[in-house]
Image (cartoon, rainbow, N blue to C red):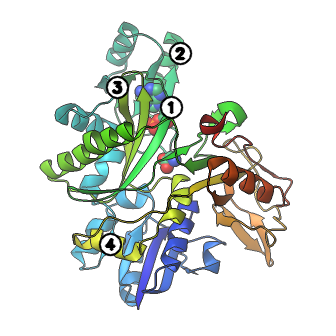
Amino acid sequence: MKSVLVIGGGGREHAIVDALRRSPQVEKIYCAPGNAGIGQQAINVPLKDTDVAGLLSFARENQVDLTVVGPEASLAAGIVDVFRAAGLKVFGHTKAATAIESSKEFAKRLMARYGIPTAAYEAFSDYDKALAYVSSRPFPSVLKYDGLAAGKGVVVAQNLEEARAALADMLLDHSFGEGRVVVEDYLTGPEFSFLCFVDGSRVYPMPLSQDHKRAFDGDKGPNTGGMGAYTGLPFITEADREFAYKEILCKAAEAMVSEGRPLSGVLYGGLMKTPEGIKVIEFNARFGDPETEVVLPLLESDIYDIFEAVATGREMEAPVWRSAFSLGVVLASKGYPGSYQKGFAIKNLDPVEARIVHMGTAFKDGQLVTNGGRVLMVIAEGPSIAEARGKVYREVAQIECDHLFYRHDIAHCALD
Ligand code: AMP
Ligand code: GLY
């Protein structure tokens, strides 16, 4: 029987722990740092996800068979390189391979070199040159800070004034750090997420899903980490999916092998179906959050086998997925993604007959309380998206907490 260490402490990691719980060969699961909900299914370990030395000591001392890395910050900190050098099995990309997410400019150059469809772009470190380029292109213009910026490094500028302010913020005031800025053309169309397990040039697709980035109904309000997700996208045809798989995900995996940076974890294509075809908005080097929470419950295969195969470079059979529809709604603290208070009691979870994933919770004197921006996610399945949605919202309505809000229109692109 195996013991596994999962790194991270959000909804994504709760979904990973939950999937590992279903593996017949997994006996013990540790999660660092975990959260209140994860602690009911695994042993929380009070170590930060970027404390590479501390995590390595823990894995060694507890004879962990396999470590699974959730967050991009841990990957970018080189945790996989360190664990591998120490002879430990680990699922996740090396630091060099994580550049596909951690450097927007690296990703754009890769796509240009290997003919992977994406928006036209230029990269700049000089404010005046960037401004001159932006002025020469049509608006809106998309400005992306070239580094990890916790989802806040992208600005869609509607006019020259907005572009000037954003470029000054990124290139003169260095609000996110010393990185350059990628300026790219604005694309339109529905966005979707294509996650795959990747081991070198072997690419195993997961069901397609769609996130909801804006805070409020009707895709209004500020950008968030994601307010809900679902699988089964009626606007993506089988031909679209084939194209995205072959011409984007497989090509990117091959390209990374050619660059001497083979992938060995999850490759997440953030894609858009534009009038000119499917194009890449971004790549991520990890499971998406909240997509993982709706995708992994559909996995029929043993996830430990998948993680272990990818971590060791062993060829495996393609994972098997159930064909049901899965949908999840995020409950967030009022005020999120701006400032919000924590520590409010959450009640009446027991009668909820749906999967509950914890994103930011804690126990205070034995009572479950809010402890983050995104707090809980409620997920259900059904034979159609409409039925999955109906079920989720019936269950969400039972949860008692005046300090949470949620969107009422998850999957509106598919249903309305
Ligand atoms: P990213 O962090 O690169 O995923 O960007 C965040 C969000 O900005 C995306 O989910 C899109 O909604 C939007 N976005 C990014 N790039 C573009 C683009 N080239 N055209 C239109 N919207 C974009
Ligand atoms: N769902 C967006 C992300 O994981 O980056």
Please name the amino acid that badge 2 sits on.
Answer: Gln
Foreground of the two, 384 or 56: 384
Q: CA distance from mark 1 to mark 3?
A: 15 Å
Whether residue 330 can be seen here: no
Q: Is residue 240 found left or right of 394 in the rendered image?
A: left
How dense is the environment of label 4, judged by Cα within 10 Å: few (below 14), some, or many (20 and up)? Answer: many
| Marks 2 & 4, CB-CB < 8 Å contact | no
Q: CA distance from mark 2 to mark 4?
A: 43 Å
Please name the amino acid that badge 3 sits on.
Answer: Ala
Residue 158 tag number? 2
| Circle 3: element type | loop
**Residue 284: image x %, image y %?**
39, 48
How dense is the environment of label 3, judged by Cα within 10 Å: few (below 14), some, or many (20 and up)? Answer: some
| Marks 4 & 3, CB-CB < 8 Å contact | no
In primary-sequence order, the first of circles 2 and 4 is: 4
Q: Is mark 3 within 8 Å of ligand 1?
A: yes
Please name the amino acid that badge 1 sits on.
Answer: Pro
The residue that appears at 69% across and 52% down in the rendered structure is 387
Residue assigned mark 1: 190
Q: Is residue 305 found left or right of 353 in the rendered image?
A: left
